[in-house]
Image (cartoon, rainbow, N blue to C red):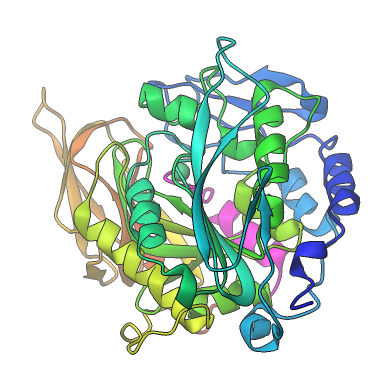
């Protein structure tokens, strides 16, 4: 018996989580171009007015939904993630996954399909699994929960095919395309316009999205000891490669420390996201955001792969000679700079730029009147996300500034929520 990670009491925890789903979740808003549907209580869905606050995303949660973060009892691992490899003595065990058994020291490509079918045609998605020859934790990588976010797909492929099962401690499970229906349509959403990443851990009796989420969570995520969910910005916005993590959770902090040279942004997970559901179930989870949607960006892909491979090394799952770089700053707060006028947005900064308070970020020019307005940074910090040059409407969230202030540490959830309200809402617009 090497470790007891794989014998956790899942039915109990899943039941607890499903009970919590009956509490109404946050009402979201959607982009005019691609409206979405967000969850309501008891699996009954309510169509949102898609013309309202068009660029804000459904990750702007209500206070009522935020309370669920504390309402779900957290599972305590017997072994902290940081010690998972060193305390895993004895022999590696076979990995049971999706009806298959992977012997230690082997890799296999499996397939997962949701029981809920759109169009009545089975759609399966590959699951890459490597079970190491030595015992250790199971790290899961998921990508394209939003079907138009491509960079993570390539990251999963590169990481998984680069692992030698004979030299691995523990297991790595990679799902390159979680939302295969969205991916095939080039869309962030499921075919019914629902955002899959607002329905975890799902509900076997809910909407199609809730059922898909439930099946995926039960079939795959329940086997993970830690999760890295890969995303990009959304809707013509791009993110500096960054980790988003709830830094109040020690195991989550362990994960963030493992990535090497990557910016960390403290961010409480939105209810319904895979990150929230996993962490609530005792599986520490972080998001890696890199680049923008609908493109394959090689620099971002390489950055993400390097971060994940560094994580495998720092967790002790693989042995490599060199670790990656100096740690990047941690941002406990961030703020969006929004357009006050409609027009053509042209940036004067680029991703990763350091800015001082008052620095010019970009201009918006009215194409008819030639009137020009400037967007300036209200804070000293760094550009961690920004819109591509485009035509914007008033209120559009254009620049995401990570506020560099070491002394700003959120003491509790209320501080964070109050801050979001005071800053006009945390537009996690390009978010998970
Ligand atoms: Zn996403």
Q: Residue 11 in the image: x percent, y percent?
A: 88, 49
In the picture shown, does residue 395 fall above or below 32?
A: below
Residue at 83%, 55% in the rendered image? 72
Residue at 75%, 76% in the rendered image? 3
**Residues shaded magenta:** 409-432
Task: Name the one closer to the observer, 243 or 342.
Answer: 243
Q: Residue 103 in the image: x percent, y percent?
A: 61, 62
Quadrant in the picture for residue 392 = top left
- On screen, residue 283 versus residue 408, left or right, reads right
Q: Residue 228 in the image: x percent, y percent?
A: 52, 60
Q: Residue 215 in the image: x percent, y percent?
A: 70, 36
> Quick check: is 415 in the magenta stretch?
yes
User: Is residue 282 visible in the rendered structure shown here?
Assistant: yes
Task: Name the one closer to the observer, 406 or 169.
Answer: 169
Residue at 45%, 65% in the rendered image? 243
In the picture shown, does residue 388 fall above or below 211?
A: below
Quadrant in the picture for residue 240 = bottom left
Residue at 21%, 65% in the rendered image? 359
Tally of marks = 0
In the picture shown, does residue 233 fall above or below 70?
A: above
Task: Name the one closer to the observer, 125 or 185.
Answer: 125
Quadrant in the picture for residue 90 = bottom right
Tell me the quarter of the image containing the N terminus.
bottom right
> Quick check: is 55 in the magenta stretch?
no
- On screen, residue 136 versus residue 90, left or right, reads left
User: Is residue 259 visible in the rendered structure shown here?
Assistant: no
């Amino acid at each position: 018996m090497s470790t007891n990670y794989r014998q956790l009491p899942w039915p109990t925890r899943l039941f607890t989580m499903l009970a919590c789903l009956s509490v109404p979740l946050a009402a979201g808003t959607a982009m005019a171009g691609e409206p979405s549907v967000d969850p309501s209580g008891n699996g009954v869905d309510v169509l949102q007015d898609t013309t309202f606050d068009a660029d804000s995303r459904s990750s702007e949660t209500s206070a009522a939904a935020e309370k669920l973060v504390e309402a779900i009892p957290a599972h305590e691992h017997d072994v902290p993630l940081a010690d998972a490899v060193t305390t895993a003595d004895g022999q590696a065990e076979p990995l049971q996954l999706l009806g298959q058994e992977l012997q230690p020291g082997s890799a296999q490509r499996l397939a997962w399909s949701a029981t809920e079918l759109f169009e009545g045609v089975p759609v399966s998605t590959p699951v890459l699994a490597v079970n190491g020859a030595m015992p250790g934790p199971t790290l899961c990588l998921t990508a394209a929960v939003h079907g138009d976010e491509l960079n993570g797909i390539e990251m999963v492929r590169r990481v998984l095919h680069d692992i030698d099962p004979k030299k691995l401690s523990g297991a790595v499970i990679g799902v390159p395309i979680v939302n295969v229906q969205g991916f095939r349509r080039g869309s962030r959403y499921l075919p019914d316009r629902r955002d899959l990443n607002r329905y975890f851990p799902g509900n076997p009796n809910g909407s199609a999205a809730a059922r898909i989420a439930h099946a995926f969570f039960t079939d795959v995520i329940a086997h993970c000891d830690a999760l890295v969910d890969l995303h990009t910005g959304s809707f013509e916005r791009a993110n500096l490669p960054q980790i988003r993590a709830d830094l109040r959770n020690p195991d989550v902090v362990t994960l963030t420390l493992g990535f090497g040279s990557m910016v960390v942004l403290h961010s409480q997970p939105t209810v319904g996201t895979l990150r929230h559901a996993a962490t609530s179930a005792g599986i520490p989870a972080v998001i890696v955001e890199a680049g923008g949607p609908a493109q394959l960006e090689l620099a971002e892909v390489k950055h993400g792969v390097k971060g994940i491979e560094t994580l495998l090394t720092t967790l002790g799952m693989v042995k490599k000679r060199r670790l990656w770089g100096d740690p990047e700053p941690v941002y406990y707060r961030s703020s969006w700079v929004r357009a006050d006028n409609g027009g053509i947005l042209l940036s004067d900064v680029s991703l990763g730029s350091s800015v001082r308070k008052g620095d010019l970020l970009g201009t918006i020019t009215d194409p008819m009147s030639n009137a020009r307005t400037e967007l300036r940074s209200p804070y000293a910090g760094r550009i961690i996300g920004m819109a591509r040059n485009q035509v914007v409407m008033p209120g559009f969230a254009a620049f995401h500034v990570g506020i560099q202030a070491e002394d700003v540490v959120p003491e509790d959830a209320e501080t964070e929520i109050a801050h979001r309200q005071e800053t006009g809402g945390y537009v996690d617009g390009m978010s998970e």
